[in-house]
Amino acid sequence: MIRIAALPSGSVSHEALLHIMGDVPIEITHHKMIADVFLSTVQGKTDYSVIPIENTIEGSVSLHMDWLVHEVDIPMQLEWVYPSIQNLIGRRSEITGADGQPEYSRIRKVLSHPVAMAQCHQFIRRELPEAELEHVGSTAEAVQMVSQNPDQGLAAIGTSLGAQKYGLDILVERVTDHDNNHTRFVLIGNRPIQVKRDADHVKTSMLITLSEDFAGALHQVLAAFSWRKLNLSRIESRPTKKKLGNYYFYIDVMAAQNSVLLNAAMEEIQALGCQVRILGSYPCYE
């Protein structure tokens, strides 16, 4: 049995994990905080952890990226993309007016994870302009809080799995601002894992820290990939947290770590005096 840590039951992370694993037997340990998801695998309590790292609308999940870089040293073993379908969830009976139609003005407060809330900004501004917004640790926690506090004018933004788990109604389906809202997840762990489907491609993620006394170092680094025709699907600068103005570059390369071209590129980059750290080389499922 594969042991996997994830955010709370009914969250998008939970839905995404069930999707990618299919009928592979797993034992899921749910945690309220992403720090505890990471630490579960660090401490050997689980074999893998599910980490959301990027969203179509909000971009990188900075807190999770910082944990991957600064707090833990566990490689990425799997990546997949899953649609983040958010819904307005509550009790239909609490917002139904005398004419049988929903009255959203009866919703006093909306709860959700800050990333999910941001994904639904236009809907909230249009339909719930007077509602108070409260951020909680996950969409599942938001739905649970609504279920535990009836007749308080509360609603949550969350998943259909969460609504089903806590016995609530989906008041409005698909309230995200964009229909193509997807989240990129990675599974981190100390050994490779296989799922029962063919990967779309292989990717290698790395951190490159530039030499401070090398003018034009970033240009030289990118050239090492370019002339070898290695495709970079992502490049992002993040502070090293050591010195103001000092950054590392997070880079995704569409090639396996053991490929001849990628190894040659890394050797050239290191010869420039730059530091290279591999975060993982893994199959990806779109």
Image (cartoon, helix red, strand yellow):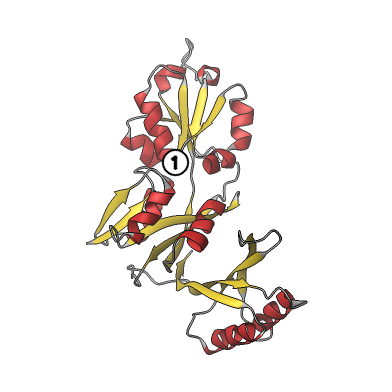
User: Residue 28, position in %: x, y?
Assistant: 29, 52
- Residue 239's place in the image compared with 262, above or below, is above
Q: Please, which residue is most extreme toward the right here?
A: 215
- Residue 237's place in the image compared with 182, above or below, is below
Between 239 and 262, which is closer to the camera in this rendering? Answer: 239
Q: Please, which residue is most extreme toward the top here?
A: 98
User: Residue 80, position in %: x, y?
Assistant: 45, 62
How crowded pointer 1 is (Cα within 10 Å; few <14, some 14-19, many 20+) is rated as many
Indicate the amino acid at tag 1: Ser
Residue 161 in view (yes/no): yes
Between 154 and 247, which is closer to the camera in this rendering? Answer: 247
Disc 1, SS: loop
Kindly identify which residue carries mark 1.
Answer: 138
Q: In the picture provided, is 83 more to the left or to the right than 31? A: right
Q: Residue at x 69, y 77 (%)?
A: 222
Q: Residue at x 56, y 84 (%)?
A: 262
Q: Please, which residue is most extreme toward the front here?
A: 243
Q: Please, which residue is most extreme toward the left here?
A: 1
Number of numbered tags placed on the structure image:
1
Q: Residue at x 46, y 31 (%)?
A: 156
Residue 171 in view (yes/no): no
Assign the N terminus to one quadrant of the image: bottom left
User: Residue 81, position in %: x, y?
Assistant: 48, 59
The quadrant in which residue 252 appears is bottom right
The quadrant in which residue 192 appears is bottom left
Between 147 and 126, which is closer to the camera in this rendering? Answer: 147
